[in-house]
Image: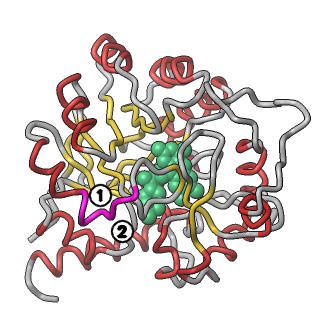
């Protein structure tokens, strides 16, 4: 049996797979376009980008593919609304949003015919998102990379949200590393699709510095843990000299705030600076967000290889040939 397509609002992805948005400049059009070309939903990480840079990247992506292109914008960002409006003006197909909850975004979605996809980590927010008009809901569990809204595992959290979301597609995210797990989440747990990010970080097309990818390839399970973040949520990241200093409570307050990126920031350290450093491959001072199951990934693949592997493995489960 073939994997079913994923329809969100007026857009249909032939493969029910969303590439999770990764900020800052981890998932750009360089990654989102090949994902969309392979039949998934390619997502540009929009948080903390200048609006004109994000718009230029969306226009680039839309000119290079007829596939589905989304932008992920965290509600915690100070210029959340400008990024949302700017993305819609630039022609993005849908907005995916998490790290806080915006009610107003659904009105913007209705007024502009733009599907809004909510990332949630509880059944209460899933119900609210559906009631307010979300076009799809992503359930993100504790195995995910980056900022986390729960300490519950995907297979524990997903079933109770599956019970309450009735009308819109429900997507599973956090720690999914291959097509067998994709089939498990869809067939056994009733997900309409999956969202994965770390697997795509370890692709040739992802434009971060190669040192970032090599550090993740070497990671053992104990090398990934939780860090404090100025966003106010815990973040899942690779343990590095920087995170060790953080754990030892060595304050790294920046002298001045260069980015002014967050609505609320405790300024314990500058998250934008640290994420930029990771993209550049600074192993000493960068903050390397990654999913908990990165240790299962043994090589850098192309986006096409990831899709071929996921689809073949998932469909082998569906057809009972595994
Ligand atoms: C490097 C990195 C950056 C991320 N940045 C964001 C982000 O800006 N906004 C967001 O909603 N999620 C972000 N995430 C979470 C992913 O979009 C995704 O939901 C999650 O990582 C899925 O789990 P997986 O990485 O185990 O596949 C990030 C994840 C990683 C690894």
- Counting labels gives 2
Please state if 68 lies on the left or on the right of 243 as rendered. left
Q: Position of residue 55 (x, y in %)?
A: 58, 27
152 is within the stretch colored magenta: yes
First along the sequence among labels 1 and 2: 2
Residue beneath the point at 49% across and 80% down: 297
Does residue 81 sit above or below 191 in this rendering?
A: above
The one nearer the camera, 135 or 295, is 295
Q: Which residue is disc 2 drawn over?
A: 176
Indicate yes or no: mark 2 CB to ligand 1 under 8 Å: yes
Q: Is residue 10 visible?
A: no
Label 1: few (<14), some or many (≥20) within 10 Å?
Answer: many
Extreme residue in the right direction: 255
Please state if 202 lies on the left or on the right of 197 as rendered. right
Q: Position of residue 41 (x, y in %)?
A: 36, 48
In the picture, which quadrant includes the C terminus?
bottom left
Q: Which residue is disc 1 drawn over?
A: 194
Is disc 1 placed on a helix, strand or loop? strand
Q: Is residue 157 visible?
A: yes
> Residue 183 sits in which quadrant?
bottom left
Residue beneath the point at 23% across and 32% down: 135
Please state if 298 lies on the left or on the right of 136 as rendered. right
Q: Are marks 1 and 2 in contact (CB under 8 Å)?
A: yes
Start-end of magenta stretch: 151-157
Q: Position of residue 149 (x, y in %)?
A: 42, 47
> Residue 204 sits in which quadrant?
bottom right
Residue beneath the point at 67% across and 32% down: 265
Q: Position of residue 3 (x, y in %)?
A: 16, 64
36 is within the stretch colored magenta: no
């Amino acid at each position: 049996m073939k994997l079913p397509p994923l329809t969100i609002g007026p857009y249909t992805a032939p493969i029910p797979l969303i590439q999770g948005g990764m900020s800052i400049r981890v998932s750009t059009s360089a990654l989102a376009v090949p994902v969309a070309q392979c039949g998934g939903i390619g997502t540009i990480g929009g948080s903390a980008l200048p609006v004109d840079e994000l718009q230029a990247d969306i226009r680039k992506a839309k000119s290079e593919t007829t596939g589905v292109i989304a932008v992920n914008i965290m509600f915690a960002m100070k210029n959340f609304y400008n990024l949302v409006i700017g993305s819609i003006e630039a022609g993005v197909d849908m907005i995916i949003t998490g790290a806080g909850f915006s009610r107003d975004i659904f009105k913007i979605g209705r007024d502009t015919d733009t599907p809004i996809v909510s990332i949630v980590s509880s059944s209460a927010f899933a119900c609210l998102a559906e009631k307010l008009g979300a076009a799809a809901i992503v359930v993100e569990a504790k195995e995910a990379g980056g900022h986390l809204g729960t300490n519950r595992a995907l297979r524990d959290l997903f079933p109770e949200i599956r019970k309450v979301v009735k009308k819109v597609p429900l997507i599973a995210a956090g720690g999914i590393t291959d097509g067998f797990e994709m089939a498990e989440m869809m067939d056994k747990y009733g997900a309409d699709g999956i969202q994965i990010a770390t697997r795509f970080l370890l692709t040739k097309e992802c434009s971060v510095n190669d040192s970032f990818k090599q550090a993740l390839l070497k990671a053992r399970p104990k090398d990934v843990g939780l860090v404090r973040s100025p966003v106010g949520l815990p973040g899942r990241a690779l343990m590095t000299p920087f995170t060790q200093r953080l754990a030892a409570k060595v304050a790294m307050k920046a002298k001045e705030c260069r980015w002014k990126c967050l609505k609320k920031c405790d300024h314990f350290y500058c998250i934008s600076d640290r994420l930029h450093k990771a993209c550049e491959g600074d192993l000493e001072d960068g903050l390397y967000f990654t999913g908990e199951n990165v240790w299962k990934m043994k090589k850098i693949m192309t986006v096409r290889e990831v899709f071929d592997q996921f689809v073949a493995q998932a469909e082998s489960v569906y057809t009972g040939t595994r």
